[in-house]
Every structure is written in C-alpha cells, then in structure tokens.
Amino acid sequence: MAYSPYWNPKNETMARDDLHALQLYKLRRMVAWAYANSPFHRAHFDAAGLTPEYIQTLDDLRRIPFMTREEWMASIADQPLFGDLPATAPANAIRYHLTSGTSGRTPIRVLDSTKDWDWIAEMWCYGLWGFGIRPQDSVYFAFGYGSFIGFWGAHYACEKMGALVIPGGAQTTEARVKQIVELGVTTVASTPTYALRLWQQATEMGINLATESKVDKLILSGEPAGSIPAVKRQLEEAWGAKAGDTAGMTELGTIMIFECARQPGGTHIIEDHYIEEVVDPATGEPVPYGTLGERVVTSFGRGFIPVLRYRTKDMVVKVPHTNCDCGRTGDLYDGGIRGRWDDMKLIRGTNVYPRAVEAIVREHDAIDEFQIYIWRRDDIRDEITIKLELKPGREAEWPALEAGLARELADAHEGLRFLIERMEPGTLPRFELKAKRLEDARPTAVYS
C-alpha cells in the first residue's frame, strides 16, 4: 500500500503565507483563552498594559512578555502544586506528568485534558510518520513508564497510526534486548544514550543487532546527542538502522521538532502548531537565520496550561525550510537542539559546552562511556577531566586515543587543557532516561 509521506499533507506543505495566516488565527485564539482563564497570563498581560485585542499581526507577538521557568517555579512555590498557570480546574484533567528534573530540584508539574492529550499524540504522529513509521511497524519503547512525560505521547501516537506498540518498562536491559529480537521489532524509541547501551548489552550477549534484529528505525529523543553526527553514525552502524532525532518538553507536553526520513541534518519545526522564535540570549532580540540563539516557543495545542513566549534556554540555529527537499514548509533547526545555554561552563576563561565535548568524544569508536568532570585544584585552579571507559578488546588503542583526544579538545576550546583519565569498565554511570554526564565538583554551586 502506498502512503503519503506526510501525516497532515495539507498543513505540512501549505504555502508560507497561508501558514502565517493560520499561526495568527491560532495565536489570537490562544491569547484570548489564556488571558480569560489563566491568572498567570492575565497578570503578565496586565503588567505590560496589553489585552488580547492588541495582537493583530504576528509581529505583535513580540509585545507579549517572555515567560520563564523561574516565574513558573515561583508560581508553583506560591500555589502548590501547579501554580496559577492552569486555565481550567484540576478536576478536568485526565493526565499528570512532571519534568525528569535534577536531584533536589522541584519539578514542573503539569496536567492535561482529554483534548490536550489527543493533541500531544497528534504532534508525535507528525514526527513518527515523517520518519517512516507505518501501520505495519512494531514499535518498542525502551523507557520506564513513570510520571516523566518521556515517550508517553509517542506510545499513543503509534496506537493512533495503527502500529503495534510494545512497552518496554520495568525490565532489565538484557530482557529488553531479548524482546526486541524475539518479537521482530522494527522500530526502537529511546534516548541516544540508551540506544547505545542496548547495543552494548546485545554485544555482551553475543547478539548482532544489525543482522539478528529486524530494527530499521531508531527514534531518538531526550538528549542533544540525537543530532550529533558521530553519535548517529555509531548508532546506525551498530543497529543497521536509520536514526531520527526528535525533541519535546514537559512544559509543552510533546514534541515540537522532528527529523524527517530524508535526514537533512536538522529537525523540522511543526509550525502549524507552534511559533518558534530564536533570540539573542543576552538581549532577547531576534536573530536571523543561521545564527546561534535561544529558542522561544509559543504553543497552540495545550489548553490546560497555556505556553506563550516561553524561554527554553535551548541553543538552536534556525534555517529555511528549503534546506530540506521533503516538501515540508516548516523551517528547520540545523543540528537539532545543540545544547542549553545554562549548561555552558566557564573553565579558566573558556566556554565549554557539553554537547561540543560529546561531539568530539564520540568520534572515537573505541570509547564505550564517558563523563565530564570539573574540579578545582588546590582551591585555586579550575580543571576539566574527561573520564573514559574503553570497549572490550580496544585497550591497545589507549595511548594514541589519550593523546589525540586531548589535542582535539584543546584545539576546539582555545587551547584549554583537558585531562584524560581511563576508568575501569563498568565504573561510570549508565542512563535509561536523560544522560547526565557532566559533574561540576567545584565548591561554588553555580558556574556559567
């Protein structure tokens, strides 16, 4: 059976002028809803001297104040558990989720209505269908089914598309590998890190996933590594499958960008459901195509908790839709989400971004796992160490790898010296959800 390459052909390929008209219609409707029903947004508008009637063009979007995570968290602290963002009563919710968060950090908690949840699945349908999933596929979700939003929306999207869904929660990695092979799974959804871990486990079990499984598609999300060429190359060779990047947020409930089957080196923005601005993180002013900036998102789909001009702190480079020949007219983020502005670390006057480090480390196939460790020598000098585990049988490569990696990292970071430390196999942490490979052990709590 021949299928369209688009989940929503009309909207995904509409002319840009028509797309902008649709965005304006949805923006005005969402602004009116938020102002009338969300105390948070009404206060935002009132403080700026705005009412919904002021939004007459897309350019008027910039009149709306930015919304920040800090404000959201302050709202939750003042009015637990959900703050004053919800635009309807909690009794109308059917779903509860929260951010994966960091140890000791209060998560953002969200609620969704039946209509919201249908939209959340619909957004995943755009991305999953766009990368090639069809009703005849069987999709394995290799993540824990907890309160973290994770792949919940993708699970329901696959059901909506008619694909077979195989939940892989509450199992060991070994058990998951066995299921993937025994059930003839064609698609695996996981973080990039865990996709590597599944392959490593399969190798230890004597299973060659590229030849002994039927997996031909990997759906990646949760980490910037999904768009790092070296990581993608490793995964595609290991699994004998195409790897597609997606990105979402608990604050939105679902994905807003996805990589299509053409794999253009970037991710399409679902522009009929979002307005994605890119601004200078210091000034908040818009930056042109091709310039690194901060994502600011306005969502049209979730009514329970409206999101208007939310500063994500994600690092992105927007490029025109013509950078991909798939026919979609939504713009792209070249290289997907490139990291977070608040992940940047200052080491002896040099900016270090974890994604940039990972892009270099993953070029070395002999490396099994790694960690970025920042520390202070003698309470004076900041140091950065890359801790590495080698793959079994690759020990002889260590001297050349150590010298080469140190040189490559220094060359990419203004001559900053990176210490390279080899660890015993199995000593570094492994991750099922979002990998946390950066440890800042300096005595001051926050460095940026």
Image: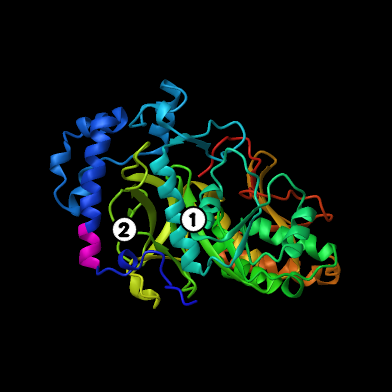
Q: Quadrant of the rendered structure where residue 164 is?
A: bottom right
| Amino acid at dot 1 | Lys
Residue name at image x 66 percent, y 64 percent? 361
Residue name at image x 24 percent, y 41 percent? 31
Residue wearing tag 2: 272
In terms of depth relative to the viewer, which is nearer, 99 or 164?
A: 164
1 or 2: tag closer to the N-terminus: 1
- Residue 292, image x, y percentages: 40, 60
Q: Quadrant of the rendered structure where residue 389 is?
A: bottom right
Of all residues shown, which one is farthest toward the front? 1
329 inside magenta stretch = no
- Residue 319, image x, y percentages: 36, 68
Is 235 situated left or right of 392 in this image?
left
Whether residue 110 is visible here, answered yes or no, is yes
- Residue 425, image x, y percentages: 83, 56
Whether residue 335 is visible here, answered yes or no, is no
Is 211 situated left or right of 344 in this image?
right
**Residue stretch rendered in magenta on the structure:** 16-21
In terms of depth relative to the viewer, which is nearer, 381 or 441?
A: 441
Mark pair 1, 2: CA separation: 20 Å
In terms of depth relative to the viewer, which is nearer, 443 or 354?
A: 354
**How many residues crowd mark 2 within 10 Å: few (<14), some (14–19), many (20+)?**
many
Residue wearing tag 1: 160
Q: Nearer the viewer, mark 1 or mark 2?
A: 1
| Amino acid at dot 2 | Asp
